[in-house]
Image (cartoon, rainbow, N blue to C red):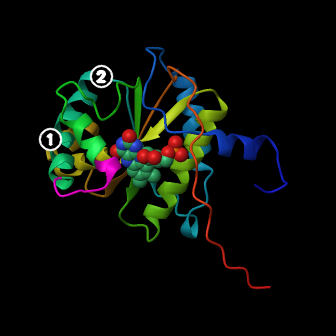
Amino acid sequence: MGVAQNNVIENIITRRSIREYTDRKVSDEDIKVIIDAGVHAPSGFDSQPWFFVVVKNRGMMKRMSDHCKPRLLAQLAEATNEAAIEFKKELAQEDFNIFYDAPVLIIILGSNAAFTTDYDCSLCAENMMLAAHSMGIGSCWIGTGCFIQDNPELLEELGITPDYRVIAPIVFGYAVKEPGETAKKEPEVVWIK
Ligand SMILES: Cc1cc2nc3c(=O)[nH]c(=O)nc-3n(C[C@H](O)[C@H](O)[C@H](O)COP(=O)(O)O)c2cc1C
C-alpha cells in the first residue's frame, strides 16, 4: 500500500459488496445525494449519458429477480470455477433473490447515442457506491439484473425506452454486519522510467 492515506482513500479501500441487508429503508434524500455523486463522474465528451430508475417496490424486484435467475443459471451451466459453482447453488434456491432483498435498487441506464456510455455509467456507478459507503450505506452491483433487457414488459413498466440500455443495476441498503476485508491481487504494473 502507498504512503498516501486520507479519508477518500480509506473510503475506497474499505468499500465491500454487501449481500445481506437489514429492513431499514434508505431515505429518498439519501438516494438523491447518491445519484448526485454519480452524475459528477467524468464522461466522454461530457455526454452525461445516464438515466436512473429507482425501484423501492419489493414486488417489482422479485419479478425482475424471477426473470433473471433462470437466464443466469443457463449461462453458468458449463461454468467450472469454484465461485460460479457456489453461486449456482445459491441461485437454484427457490427463495434466493438476486437483489438480496435490499430495500432499494437503482438501475443506471446508458444512452445508446453516446460513444462512451458503458465507461461513463460504470464511473457513475462507482461514484455512487463510494458515496453510499461514506454515508454508512452498503451496495452491490448486480450484473445479473441486466437480463431484464430482454423483457419488454418489465422494461415498459420501468419506464425504460429503447434509447437506453441497462448498464449497472445496483442495490443499496444497510448491512446486517460489517463486511470483512477481502484480499485483492497484487497489481501487475510495468514502470517505464
Ligand atoms: C460488472 C459487475 C457485475 C456484478 N454482478 C454481481 C451479481 O450479479 N451479483 C453479486 O452478488 N455481485 C455482483 N458483483 C459484485 C462482485 O462480485 C464484487 O464486486 C467482487 O466480488 C469484489 O468484491 P468487493 O466489491 O467486495 O470488493 C458485480 C460486480 C461488477 C463490477
SS for callout 2: helix
Quadrant of the image for the C terminus? Answer: bottom right
Do callouts 1 and 2 mark residues in contact (Cβ within 8 Å)? no
Which residue sits at x=14%, y=41%?
A: 153
Q: Earlier in the sequence, mark 1 or mark 2?
A: 2
* Residue 121 horizontal side relative to residue 156, left or right: right
| Percent position of residue 142, x then y | 37, 43
Mark 1 lies on residue: 153
Q: Residue at x 69, y 40 (%)?
A: 11
The residue stretch that appears in magenta: 77-84
100 or 34, nearer to the observer:
100
The answer to whether 152 is drawn above or below residue 179 in the figure is below
x and y, in percent, of residue 86 in the image: 30, 42
Instruction: Say which residue label 2 marks.
Output: 58
**102 displayed left or right of 161:** right
Asked whether 78 falls inside the magenta stretch, the response is yes
- Residue 53's image quarter? top left
56 in magenta: no
